Image (cartoon, rainbow, N blue to C red):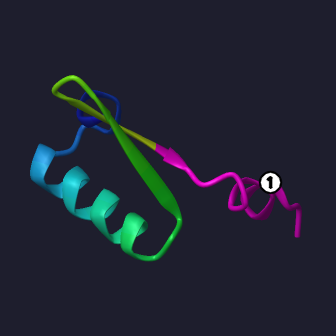
Amino acid sequence: MVHVLKQKQNLVSHHLSIMKQNDVAESFKISRYTYYRLKPEIRPILNRKN
């Protein structure tokens, strides 16, 4: 994500942490890597056309 967003790692981590605290994202760990994704119930909200 850091490379795609062209942001510093600590800034991306900070925002992901906020998203998790607000139940927007969830994470899971496989080996030494942590993966993040939007919670399924959030996706329809983002897909709405206003």
Q: Quadrant of the C terminus?
A: bottom right
Q: Name the element at disc 1.
A: helix
Image position, residue 3 (x, y; %): 25, 28
Q: Residues within 10 Å of mark 1 (few under 14, many from 20)?
A: few
Q: Residue at x 24, y 36 (%)?
A: 2
Using the image, determine if residue 25 lies above or below residue 9.
Answer: below
Looking at this view, is 30 or 40 the one in front? 30
- Position of 3 with respect to 19 (left or right) is left
Q: Amino acid at mark 1?
A: Asn
Looking at this view, is 17 or 1 the one in front? 17
Using the image, determine if residue 36 lies above or below residue 33.
Answer: below
Image position, residue 20 (x, y; %): 40, 65
Disc count in the image?
A: 1
What residue sits right under mark 1 in the picture? Answer: 47
Image position, residue 39 (x, y; %): 60, 55
Using the image, determine if residue 48 lies above or below residue 6.
Answer: below
